[in-house]
Image (cartoon, rainbow, N blue to C red):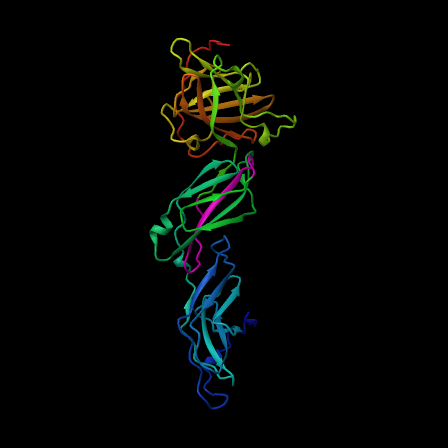
Amino acid sequence: MRRVVRYPLLLLALAAPACQDVLVDGGTRPSTPANVGYELEPSGDPAQPLGILLFWDDVPDGDLAAYRVYSRGSTSGSFGLRGETSSNTFHDNGVPHLQYFVTAIDDAGNESGGSAAITVDERLQLDAPASLFSISLNGAIHLQWDDNAFAGAPTRFKWYRVYSAVYDLDTGDCGTTWILEGTTVAPEFLASALANGAPRCYGVSAVSREGYESLWSPLRQDTPRPDARNTLAFAYDENPSQSGFRFWQDLNGDGRAQATELGRVLDGNRTDIDFWVYRDPTDSTLWIVPEFSGTRIRLYGTTPVADLTDIDFAPATGYTRDMIQAVPGYGYVFEIVEDTTRRYGALRVTHVGRDYLIFDWSFQTDIGNPELVVRAGLTTSLATGRPISDGR
């Protein structure tokens, strides 16, 4: 690895040695470095980058000894020596100066003229992502945002940076300690290996090829939750032992749901199941019947949903103890109250036959958290079906 030697900034009044006319050995000056460029190192705060990386074309002189980097903090100040390196790159920690130029030094100590100065111009900052959406998944969060930063400057766009912090559901506040989840060139990102039931806050910035970081997108909070696909439950009068379903069960008595307690198909005769499947004897339609005393149900909208992930925050009102007909493609949301705790679950029916139905389900383990998946504003009027006729 090439060694980089750093020197403190000299007084602004110090003139750059490149302006000296006397050569040490009476020879010629080294070649002048050309094509100086830079890239900022983002920190998450557009006004406080971690540093700047300078780079330039390597000087081909055989007696080249080192390069010197000069900088100044304003156009009215004098350039001072910032550091010296044997590499054709230079990393300057902290908030960068306004302007930099580079010279070359030969073995005799002769110094070239200065390169063209580069100016660190924050006006090259990209637009912040205009929106941020999310989808709650099992142990993960899918994030998606407006691609306006790329669309506004496609030749200067480099990538997006995704940040996260803890989220306090009770106060509605994001934490103050943000971490970098990762970077991506696409306007989407999968934050994975997350704990279910632990809310997090997310923000996204755009970074240019020069390293300028934009302001952040609007913040978005989301909470991973367990789910499962293609769960099979029979009509009670077809197979009673496989006609009930419970989203979760607190086997430990401490309010914590674990994987072995989630999404269980159970006997329809139990009173602690969240619902059981009733078959109408006249037309063989199947109905979802709330069973546990604290479980209520409502239809999620009056039209089918394309996927389980389209079922958003659980509505605050509109739940019923009445049964609702199971219809393929439709979504259903459950409010489950046990003692003083309230939780929410959802399912999307994928198939309804004469004897059984198949559905996808999700459940939010975080107490009181209504977040089941993604976009708000899809809930509509309640459909309650008809009074329960206990077919057991």
- Magenta segment includes 200: yes
Image position of 85 with respect to 391: above or below: below
Q: Residue 116, can we see it?
A: yes
Q: Main secondary structure of the magenta part?
A: loop
Which residue in the rendered view is the most extreme toward the bottom? Answer: 26
Q: Position of residue 335 (x, y in %)?
A: 51, 23
- Magenta stretch: give its range: 195-217
Q: Position of residue 375 (x, y in %)?
A: 42, 34
Q: Residue 316, can we see it?
A: no
State the residue in front, 302 or 353.
353
- Magenta segment includes 135: no
Image position of 210 with respect to 235: above or below: below
Q: Position of residue 54 (x, y in %)?
A: 46, 67
Q: Is residue 101 left or right of residue 263?
A: left
Image position of 327 with respect to 51: above or below: above
Residue at 59%, 29% in the rendered image: 260
Looking at the rendered image, the quarter that the N terminus falls into is bottom right
